Amino acid sequence: MSVTEFVLYLIYGFAMVTMGIFAILQKDTKIMNLSLIKSLKYLGGFGIFHGISEWISMIIKLELCHPYYHTEVYYGNLIIKAISFAFLMYFGLDLLPLRDRYKRIILKTPIILTLLYLLGFFFLMSKYGVDYHHTNNTYNIITLRYLLGFPSCIISAIALYINAGLIEKTKSVIIAKRYKNLAWVFIVYGLLEGLLVSKAEFFPANLINKELFVEYFNFNPLFIKAFIGFVINFLLIKVIATFSWEQEEKLNQLERFKIASKERRKLGLEIHDSIIQELYAAGLKIEYLSINKEENKKRDILEEVKNDLNNAINKTREFISTTALGKIKLEDLNDSLEQLVQMFNDNQSIKINLESQISPYTTGHLSPDKSTQIYYIIQEAISNVTKHSEAEEASILLEGRYDFLYITIIDNGKGISQKNINPDKNFGISSMQDRTERVGGSFIIGKAKKGTRIEMKIPWEKPKGE
């Protein structure tokens, strides 16, 4: 191994490991509800495993490991590389804008492919001897590079490009451009890592390989790979930096709702100190009238009761006008639902869980009218669960996708299906269905594995002025 090749392996491994560590550290998904941030841990796994694999390749070429363990180290390195590509494929598939129920199925693909690779790897060793892969690289080129490496890069590029299109539609052209740049980087990397293999006597390794690349371009492809590692780092930093405003906006929303909560508590004390006191006073006076029969005092006391009741009515009207639920904007919907769920959890035994996957970068537009209707639909659903389901737990999931807002509500109670619904008796379900249709959505209710599953699909609107 030349000094240049040694340095390139060292830099390439360092670039990958650095990228992996940086990606894993970006895990604050509670504030930054963004699909890329949530998927970065898998890209981080790829970077760390792949960087370590390149360093092991360097050690093998330098013959630094003991000859007795050479085969074990070589085989261990192949398995580490396979795991790294599985992480990269997992990153790409997880980043695809699919609903969670479908994504859970698709995300099994990298695991299945890796297990199949390992199965074939050990089968060939058992059949043809322990040194088979050391002397014959056909299996590893086909499976490790063509079926794992290249597709994982292309899937990641496609996922980034799709997300770029969605972001471009809804929010930022600049951020979308950075996503696209990252997608192109992964395509180039896929061509280098997946197709530039050692020369072999089968297609396409006999036509596209490292030896021919070096012969035609007169430089080692490790130069480009090392450079790409740093480019991925740079673009990730730029992409993530652009989302800092989302953290600030979230904190501002929390502060606004904190202030609103204080106002509600203040109003609650006011109800207790004024309206309830007025009604209590009126009650005492009526009780006095029922005991005492003095005619000369009745008129005055009745007048006082009338005034007390009028005061209570006026204060109640004032309270209602102050606290009545107004229109809810889409960006405030999650916070309103969190308060609603908290209220139910504080007042009954069924545990209600809320998960919201609505990011301002990957969702469309909904008018305050529609957002408010969604709030009432979920409120009715929770109410039905607590009254009729006999469940121990219920989950509410909001998924913001590029075409629809999906809402899934599942409980583990006794269950109900569409055919068992009586519009005259199940008024709450009919109300939910009517409200969903009113906002242009679809409503499906049916039995889950245990309990009831409700699914709603509500299309985004075009913003006014488009």
Image (cartoon, grey):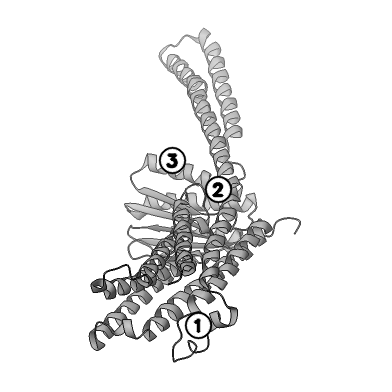
Residue 190 percent across, percent down from the top left: 52, 74
Q: To which quarter of the image does residue 138 belong?
A: bottom left
Q: Earlier in the sequence, mark 2 or mark 3?
A: 2
**x and y percent of residue 271 in the render?**
51, 25
Residue lying at 26% horizontally and 73% vertically, measured from the top left: 67
The residue lying at 59 percent from left, 48 percent from top is 331
Quadrant into which the C terminus falls = bottom right
Question: Which of these two is toward me, 100 or 64?
Answer: 64
Left or right of residue 25, residue 63 in this image: left
Q: Nearer the viewer, mark 1 or mark 2?
A: 1
Residue 3, visible in the rendered structure: yes
Instruction: Identify the residue position indicated by label 3 in the image.
Output: 343
Q: Please state which amino acid type lies under the numbered disc 1.
A: Glu
- Secondary structure under tag 1 reads helix
330 horizontally vs 147: left or right? right
Give the residue at mark 2. Answer: 333
Nearer the camera: disc 1 or disc 3: 1
* Label 1 Cα crowd, 10 Å radius (few <14 / some 14-19 / many 20+): some
Under mark 3, the amino acid is Met
Q: CA distance from mark 2 to mark 3?
A: 15 Å
Going from N to C along the chain, the mark reached first, 1 or 3, is 1
**Which residue is more in the foreground, 392 or 144?**
144
